[in-house]
Image (cartoon, rainbow, N blue to C red):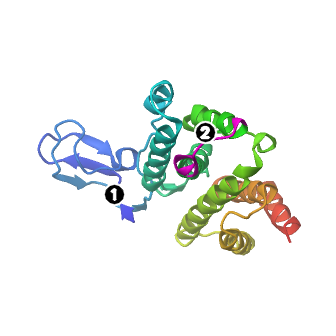
Amino acid sequence: MKVRGTRECKRCGNQWSYYETGSVTCPDCGSMESVGLDENRLQQTDRPATLELVEIRNALDKEPAREVASLAAEEGRRYVRKRGFIRGGELLPLDGTYLAANELRHAGELFSRSMRMTDDEEIYFYSLLSGADEGERPDTEDLPESIYEIRGLADAESLKEYHREMGEWTREHDVSRESRSTLETLGEHVRRAQALEGGTDIDTAEALVSAARELRRYFDQGDTDALASSQDRLDRLG
């Protein structure tokens, strides 16, 4: 949607940025009666969100692993639902916290149904839970084979949402024909990854994430080297 970013409260006169708070409610007095002051409306899909994992990590010593996994899955799901990638007309990066939250959601769902984790799975899950809120995930070489599908599915779903919003953003901006073509090619690969329902090769998923990030860097900075690198990654995927 498009919104006017600067809001003014009708009750107390306070001004704030909707782009930062994601709310028309006055942060000072709580009134929902406000008006937009900007002349132009800008695209906004992102809402402020924090991946809250401290209490879930603390529960590791008190609750069964399956219960902790269920809590982690729900928190990852909540975070992903709130997030978007356009803020005040700016296309945001595909950040590590979003990727990690999506992976935590799927890993948590898997382990909440499992009778027990293997030692490798337990190390993986605790590592993911430890760093997801900082945008950190276990390295691909450290993943147990049972997690390959989780990583592929999480990345494919993240890429689907990111590609969709990249498309929304480009419809409002004058971008080069070459970059539009690259975006279309990225979309073809993302749809293929989605169709595999988690069967995406991990290296392919990482290449697609990198290609999407490089294409965004071109949109943001006009970095032609980033565009060329994005195209090259996609070409190598066939």
Q: Which residue is located at x 41 percent, y 50 percent?
A: 47
Task: Name the residue that disc number 1 marks.
Answer: 4
Q: Are marks 2 and 1 in contact (CB under 8 Å)?
A: no
Q: Position of residue 170 (x, y in %)?
A: 58, 69
Q: Secondary structure at mark 2?
A: loop
Q: Is residue 40 visible?
A: no
Note whether 14 is above or below 148 in the view shown. above
Task: Name the residue that disc number 2 marks.
Answer: 135
Q: Nearer the viewer, residue 128 or 228?
A: 128
Q: Nearer the viewer, residue 74 or 121?
A: 121
Instruction: Give the quarter of the figure containing the C terminus.
Output: bottom right
Q: Position of residue 120 (x, y in %)?
A: 72, 37
Q: Quadrant of residue 175?
A: bottom right
Crowd tier of the residue under label 1, counting other residues whose Cα lies within 10 Å: few below 14, some 14–19, many 20 or above? some
Instruction: Give the quarter of the figure containing the N terminus.
Output: bottom left
Q: Amino acid at mark 2?
A: Gly
Q: Is residue 73 left or right of residue 184?
A: left
